[in-house]
Amino acid sequence: MKNILSIAILSVLFVACGGDPASVDGIIAEGNVDAMRAMKNELTTQQNTIKEDIAKLTEEIQKHEKGGPASLVTTKTVKDTTFKHYIEVQGNVDTDENIIIYPEYSGVLTSVYVEEGQRVSKGQRLAKIDEGGLGSQLAQLEAQAALAKTTYERQKRLWDQKIGSEIQYLEAKTNYDATQASVNQMKSQLAKTVITAPFSGVVDDIIAEQGGVVNPGQTPVIRLVNLSEMYVDAAIPETYLSKVNKGTDVIVELSSLGKSYEGQIRQVGNFVNPDNRTFNVKVAIPNPDNAVKPNLIATVKINDYTAENAIVVPQNVLQQNSSGENIAYIYEKQNDTTGVAKQVKIETGLTQGETIEIKSGIEKGEILIIDGARALRDGQKIRANSTDND
């Protein structure tokens, strides 16, 4: 083997110099760029040819060295498992209970009863607007309503005894009903001067200043957020419409928090966006410590395929032969210390992360070579270092 390699090396040196050690220097000295390119291309071609010949000789030498040392590889016994494939999309954390509260009444903001960060209950008073005399008007209307009620009740008693005219009874009843409606309307107006919490949550921001004038639908007063009802909203390509349903398993990853949640799709949109051909899904996520905030970016992994009793191997153990077929090597034990590498053709399924599903070619219980396989050939003698106990 040493003699063959020596001859090959001498041949390279001789050819590279064109049989004349000064020929390369001579062409360089002439300064002819075209001649220099031509010699470079010729030498490169000859060099590649010699490399191929050396590789062939090395392969043949290894085939004839039957008594040589066995190569050391790492193996693992193949087991079946549940294989899950996920499609991955980006989503946005949101909550339906994240609002800015606007006043329903125009006036001066006289009181703010809460502080930023304070937890409040549904219906709790948050702020008060100057009523502008509505209380006095209500008192007058209530007095009028009380008189109208008394008059109506008296007219009713007389009418029940067939005393008096029907028109007097109806006028009293109409007057009472109208006065009571005015009282209710005034109470409704007066209630609008008090801003209350529409749901339980946390006061995130007090926007309006106490003493300032606020107007309905124009002046933001308080932002209220409920962080206990969080979800992720994600857009899914329409090609997955048949594979994504309510209850489909998902994994939500929040990289900014370093957290991951397992859950299920709670809602699938019924509308395909014509601009990007996607439909929306919502996934509820827990938030016991209120660490999850609205508008966080989330990675949503949706389980679109599951196979039970599947054979799954690392992707890096697969190679391709000259025909473009996927192959791997199985360890066939011959004695207590050595065995041989058997090349098998593989039919693959879906990939997930660094693993790939095997449809055929490898069976449960076989010993797969996972490290050192790229330097092997079919039938080569090997020694195995198992990782089954790792």
Image (cartoon, rainbow, N blue to C red):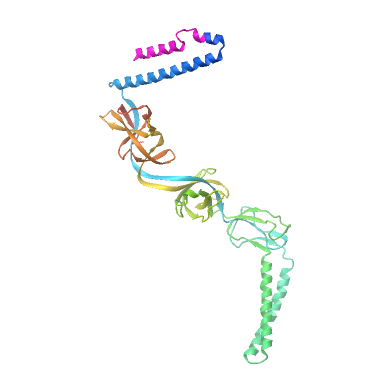
Please indicate whether residue 2 sits to the left or right of residue 260 in the image.
left
- Is residue 6 shown in magenta? yes
Q: Which residues are magenta?
A: 1-25
Q: Residue at x 47, y 16 (%)?
A: 42
Residue 114 sits in quarter: bottom right
Is residue 303 visible in the rendered image? The answer is yes
What percent of the width, then of the height, locates residue 370? 37, 33
Q: Is residue 44 above or below residue 215?
A: above
Query: Which of the image's four quarters has the C terminus?
Result: top left
269 is within the stretch colored magenta: no
Residue 151 visible to an observer of this rendering: no
Q: Position of residue 339 (x, y in %)?
A: 28, 29
**Magenta span dominant secondary structure:** helix
Residue pictured at 56% horizontal, 14% vertical: 33
- Residue depicted at 54% across the width and 11% down the height: 28
Q: Quadrant of residue 384?
A: top left
Where residue 275 appears, x then y in whole percent? 57, 49
